[in-house]
Image: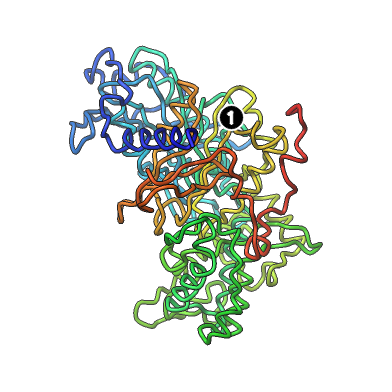
Amino acid sequence: MRREKIWRWKLLLSFCMVTGMFAGNVMTASPAAAALQNCNAAFLSGLLVGNVSITSATDVPAANGVPEYCQVVAAVTTNGDGAGLGLANIRLRLPATWNNRFLFLGCGGECGSITSVSAEAVDQNESLPQGYAVVNTDTGHTDPTNAWTLITTGVPNTPALTDFYYRAVHQTTVAAKKLVQGYYKGGIKHAYFDGCSTGGRQALMEADRYPDDFDGIIAGDPVMAFPETLLGHLHGLKIFAPAANYLPASALQAIDAAVKANCDAADGVADGLAQNPAACSFDPNSLVKAGTLTQAQANAFKAYLGPIKDSRGNLVFPGYSETDLATVAFLGTWTEEACPAIPGSGVNPWSGETAPGCSPNGPSGLGFSQPLIANITELNPNFDVWDNFPFNNDIVGEAGLKALRNTIGVGSSDQPKDARKFLKRGGKLIMYHGFSDPSVSPYQSIWFYHGLARLEGGIERLQQSARLFMVPGMGHCSGGPGPNTFDTLGALDAWVSRDVPPDGIVATNTSTGRTMPLCKYPEMASYVGTNVNDAGSWVCKPSDKRMREIGLDGRLAHVHAFPDPDELGPKNGN
């Protein structure tokens, strides 16, 4: 009981620091040497950072809680890795009062703009007020659509692709650090990377390829298995495209209600959230008996919960979670309301839709998988991925999978063995994933974490340097009915700078005001109070392993496809 009280006080203290109740305890920043008098292109160019061309330097006055800062826009010439010269633009924000810390923010989707940032919202909002020097990049192209991947049909844009995969983040990090140190005339004490989605992939890529770039890394909802994620999108689209399989909003609401009735209370309290969807045993056929779904719809949803396999039966990508479909953008990712696919319409089965409210571009999942596979793997923007790529039901052909991995696999960061280099040099890694993410399977992050734990000698040993937080009810990087905003940057800095690891991170749903702790995997928040909407009524228990329990839905998704990491990991961590 005493231990539980201590955990509750720790979590409440974390929440108070996030919300500003104990503002006096927030990290104090040291003053910059020269304020903003050097916020001009001439001074910054005079720092002679070899591969950098300063585009502009603007003194931005304090406003809306953000202190005065110098915004620098610059172009970084990238080179090497056998890819030829590229050009990556950066936006660097230098606060008047610097805390001697450097923060790189990842980007979302295909990037393509210095305004494209994908990282936890609290982290983004707090970074400048707390004195971080903050940088981000367009990753070497200024076209946010897929056209940048090709110079012309048959000719890949190799410099831009290499920059997008890994080169631009590393080389702009090196350049931006020199600008920061020259501007402030002082050294960087700690450097962090923070990203979600594509930014999460970039985060793990930095750990894999450039373990010395950062002291701490935050990887959220990472698109770490790039080719396999594209297949996951193609898989979901093909499942629900036939008119008989199509799930309208009313069907999603019925599934949500049935899932909550089945497994909401499995974590100890009925509060509208299933903390561990893998432990659920919802059977879609139960809604057929109730007359809510047709058998075709139920079969389609069951296929969505299942994995992709290769022609030999090997697992390629896990299935998806069954929770909160109506509130996490499932509709729009895989289908469009009242706009089912039109069979036989070629590259885009939605292109012939003309009904009011329908988009001829189709669901967002199509815009991610079709053009990238066509452009990067087939080198032909007109290639009909939908009809011609070797993918049938949940089976991908060996030749197609090999082609994807040979062309796009270089952009993946899903091999646990590669991340060990970062951990071995003392780096700290925080991962998180929305458990209701309809875009990137949350079970991919669990696969990765289990693989890393086996290499490090078990989960307890891994937790000394890397921790995973599964976020119940959150969609892809945000949204959903769960506690979906949280301070991972503060947690990372406390871990790196003061050796205080995050046992629980208090999260808030900004729409409902609900607060709740996110516990480190495999722990699950335990309800011990009187108000489910108050983080003070929940505790994280170190002995808890309920996140590793699985039911029918977890078995369908193959969430624990790999053996128990605590049983197989080498005991010496080598």
Q: In the visual, does 184 lie left or right of 224?
A: left
The front one of 567 and 86 is: 567
Tell me which amino acid carries mark 1. Ser
Q: Residue at x 38, y 34 (%)?
A: 14
Q: Quadrant of residue 308?
A: bottom right
- Tell me where residue 81 appears, x and y as whole percent: 63, 33
**Mark count:** 1
Q: Residue at x 43, y 17 (%)?
A: 189
The front one of 50 and 318 is: 318
Q: Which residue is mark 1?
A: 465
- Tell me where residue 131 appears, x and y as whole percent: 31, 25
The image shows residue 139, relative to residue 252, as above or below, that is above
Q: Quadrant of the C terminus?
A: top right
Furthest toward the front, the residue is 1
The front one of 410 and 430 is: 430
Q: Quadrant of residue 361?
A: bottom left
Q: Residue at x 23, y 20 (%)?
A: 36
- Tell me where residue 571 appears, x and y as whole percent: 76, 30
How was the colour assigned to the protein in this rendering?
rainbow
Q: Quadrant of residue 79?
A: top right
The front one of 436 and 114 is: 436
Q: Is residue 89 visible?
A: no
The image shows residue 344, relative to residue 444, as above or below, that is below
SS at circle 1: loop
The image shows residue 257, relative to residue 403, as above or below, that is below
Q: Residue at x 50, y 22 (%)?
A: 499
Q: In the visual, does 18 lie left or right of 458?
A: left
- Tell me where residue 473 appears, x and y as whole percent: 45, 57
Q: In the visual, does 67 lie left or right of 333?
A: left
